[in-house]
Image (cartoon, rainbow, N blue to C red):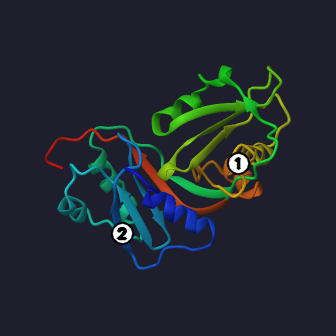
Amino acid sequence: MGGVHPIAEVLSKAAGGDFPAVDGSWQRVDPWRPGIEGVLAFTGHAWLAVDDDVSDGTLTSLSPDGYGGASNPRLVSRLAGTGWIDALDVVLVARGTGGEPRLVPRSDLRNHPRAEHATLVRSEVVTFGYAAPDDHTLVTLSTGIGGLPEVGLETDPAHEHSGADVARDALALVPEGEVVVAACAPGNARALRAFISAGYEPVASVQLWRPERDQRA
């Protein structure tokens, strides 16, 4: 699949304040990563990234719509089959700042649980942190939702980095002006506040799954 993925395009437009029409409709697109499917929902408009073994008729029969139907747990469960289903997350966008990053590559953090989780759903995951070897603050930078750069983070409580500071420092890992995404569970209010304080803006929701279904889908 060449070129810019439609999900990357719509998220990039949202980062500039250009949102989809609030018309209750939904669209189907190809998955942006083999083995990972998902639903991206904006206010009144949704995208379903589902492989072609699921027919258009099956999708329509599950009653997706842009007003929450595309994220209905029954729809997600039907499409995932017996496969793993991720939490429903808020999608936030920001722009890279470039410059001299405070974060440095930290291959010793590669086995951190958050880095391992990133590997399950994203590509080209690289782990960063601060230079002090006893500081286990983690930032992952990967190819994520729609093929855009995606960051994830976890602070080390033994050190005095605020979540907002870490989220802001992560933007320096991405060239200036390039759109960056982050996904955060809505119940993780501390992380959500940190991203917003660092300048990330919530624009949509996303839920991912690794499908394991029979061929009748």
Q: In this picture, is 162 found above or below 16?
A: above
Rendered view: 9 above or below 109: below
Q: Give x and y (percent) for residue 46.
A: 41, 66
Numbered disc in front, either 2 or 1: 2
Residue beneath the point at 50% across and 63% down: 9
Mark 2, residues whose alpha carbon is within 10 Å: few (<14), some, or many (≥20)? Answer: many
Q: Secondary structure at mark 1?
A: helix
Q: Position of residue 158 (x, y in %)?
A: 81, 28
133 vs 185, left or right, is right
Q: Which mark is residue 190?
A: 1
Q: Amino acid at mark 2?
A: Trp
Residue 214 at x, y = what percent?
18, 41
Q: Which mark is residue 161?
A: none
Residue drawn at 83 percent across, 31 percent down:
159
Q: CA distance from mark 2 to mark 1?
A: 31 Å
The crowd level at tag 1 (other Cα within 10 Å; few <14, some 14-19, many 20+) is few
* Residue at x 28%, y 49% (from the top left corner): 51
Q: Which residue was labeled with disc 2?
A: 26
Report the amino acid beneath label 1: Arg
Q: Give the tally of numbered discs.
A: 2
Q: Is residue 184 left or right of residue 161?
A: left
**Residue 116 found in image quarter:** top right
- Looking at the picture, tell me which residue is in the foreground, 53 or 60: 53
Does dot 2 land on a helix, a strand or a loop? strand
* 2 and 1 marks in contact (CB < 8 Å): no
Q: Residue furthest front?
A: 2
